[in-house]
Image (cartoon, helix red, strand yellow):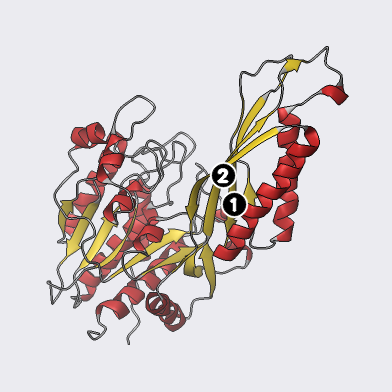
Amino acid sequence: MSVFRINGDRLWDSLMTMAKVGATERGGNCRLALSQEDLAGRELFMSWCREAGMDIAFDAIGNLFARRKGLHDSLAPIVMGSHLDTQPKGGRFDGIYGVLSGLEVVRSLNDLGITTRHPLEIAVWTNEEGARFTPAMFGSAVFTEALSLQTALGAKDAMGISVAEALAEIGHHGTLPFKRPFDAYFEAHIEQGPILEDNGLPVGVVTGGQAICWLDVQVIGVGAHAGTTPMPLRKDAFLGAAEMAMALEALSRDFAPKGLVTVGQLEIAKSSRNTIPGSIQFTVDLRHHEDQQIHAMEQAVGARFAHIAQQRGLGLEINRHWLSPATPFDSACVAAVRAAVEELEYPHQDIVSGAGHDAIHLARHCPTTMIFIPCVGGLSHNEAEDALPEDVRMGCDVLLNAVLRRAHRLPD
């Protein structure tokens, strides 16, 4: 099969033009889901798609689909995409790269005069970031019926505005059915971590997403006066939580190198400068490539925390907030990416996604995989997020050739 290349300058220019929409003072972006800034980014993208001869449609949660007809247009589409919404202080590439890489694939096919057997679509998934509305990734979750439409429409932001109201305000809702057939889904993305850059490699062949387990922990002590209660008689919920956090770090070494632990939120109930904390709530984020190991980590957390609570005379409650199993990507789609990167002779490695992506939901609906490129310093969800033009180009070259391999294969 012939090897094709995209127009790297055009892709970079599109990324930098999109970066002007919702630009922040420090070179990042703020396009919260279904905001006016998000609307402006969507409208810019749609104008480019129409110029490329694509048709635009929406579903009821605001997922946007741009379609390029195929030789056999009744076949299920091969879909590329990601998201255009950002964190409040987000970067220029997270999500945006996947959407605009899909557009560059279409533009390059137009330049080459190639029409694929299957129609192609570019998906812009609603509210991937979860920065304005929760849960995150609910556009793809509703599409795949992992989350009900009514639940998502009822979610409200900090100002009390519901998703239904926000969608009505921007007018980006339609009648495309959920869970309609896709032949395959390809998502290009910055890695959002340091592995590819540390290894000096421009492309990651993503074989799946790791398991994630979120726990809510409450440590219950006795609130008392900070100046009159002797240390040996205290039941300090904060010091108990602190010891649990240190135990969590020690536990990660037992599951190294793939086990990851994070305490991302901590709250002292009714806190006061001169009062011993009587109740602490904190979150635990556990991650591992293997389901068996994530369950072992969860059990170990429970046992170690219970031991600390007993030694300190504290009460303890642990509840599982969310569990996302490890998600292997489709072997044929992964093979298409690997064949493309090898034919292009780009240095690469297999990699497992450490972050959540819309592709995780889509993998339970259709054959799916991802392509990673490095981000500078492994930094993401930050205004300083950056990527190198050559890496941007090479990742999209891989996407183009992988999609072509899928689009021209013989029927099963």
Question: Is any part of residue 53 visible from this angle?
Answer: yes
Q: Amino acid at mark 1?
A: Leu
Which of disc 2 and disc 1 is earlier in sequence? 2
Placement of the N terminus among the 4 image quadrants: bottom left
Question: Is any part of residue 290 visible from this angle?
Answer: no
Q: Position of residue 234 (x, y in %)?
A: 80, 23
Q: Position of residue 32 (x, y in %)?
A: 36, 37
Name the disc covering residue 286, or none.
1
Residue shown at 29% from the left, 31% from the top: 162
Q: Quadrant of residue 254?
A: bottom right
Q: Quadrant of residue 220?
A: top right
Residue shown at 32% from the left, 57% from the top: 100
Circles 1 and 2, Cβ within 8 Å, touching? The answer is: yes
Q: Amino acid at mark 2?
A: Leu
Residue shown at 58% from the left, 36% from the top: 265
SS at mark 2 in the image? strand
